[in-house]
Image: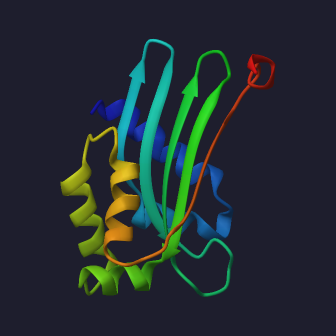
Amino acid sequence: MNEDLKIAAYKRIVNRVESSEKEAVKRTACILYASKFANGTKEIHFYSSDFMNENEDLFQFEYNIEYTNGDFQNGNGMIDTKDVLEAFGFVGYSELKTYFSEKYNDDERAWHKIVKELEDKGLSPIVDESEGGNDYMTNF
């Protein structure tokens, strides 16, 4: 994985969250995949934070594909971090982060594999995939 792309992806993640979340995201974010291709970029990452400010850490995993023509594809998933730690038998988030980063580093299908692995552990993450862009609706 290109280190410059990884750093840029990390900065984008941190900069787009609200100030109350920044420290948690800085501490927990992990870039699994960052690639630039002929007509766009793709990033896959995860982190844990209390983005709803309800004292509940959520394990959040996302992919973003952006094309040079303005089209995009996104996948977002979330589940209570405590539930993930318990299902995997980990004591803390750092173990989970190490596990996923070693298993899925530089894997362009990491997001879908994480969803499947969570489901295989009996968990039900909230997942959403979407696509769109400048000319998205005119192509139908």
The residue at the point 26 percent across, 87 percent down is 91
| Whether residue 114 is situated above or below residue 55 in the rendered picture | above
| Whether residue 139 is situated above or below residue 33 in the rendered picture | above
86 relative to 52 in the view: left or right:
left
| Whether residue 104 is situated above or below residue 53 in the rendered picture | above
4 relative to 91 in the view: left or right:
right
121 relative to 28 in the view: left or right:
left
The residue at the point 25 percent across, 47 percent down is 105
Displayed quadrant of residue 36: top left
Displayed quadrant of residue 46: bottom left
The residue most toward the front is 140
| Whether residue 122 is situated above or below residue 42 in the rendered picture | below
Percent x, y of residue 18: 68, 62
Q: How many discs appear?
A: 0
Q: Nearer the viewer, residue 48 or 130?
A: 130
Q: Nearer the viewer, residue 66 or 6?
A: 66
> Which coloring applies here?
rainbow
**Res. 31 in view:** no
Percent x, y of residue 135: 76, 19
The residue at the point 65 percent across, 15 percent down is 69
Percent x, y of residue 101: 25, 56
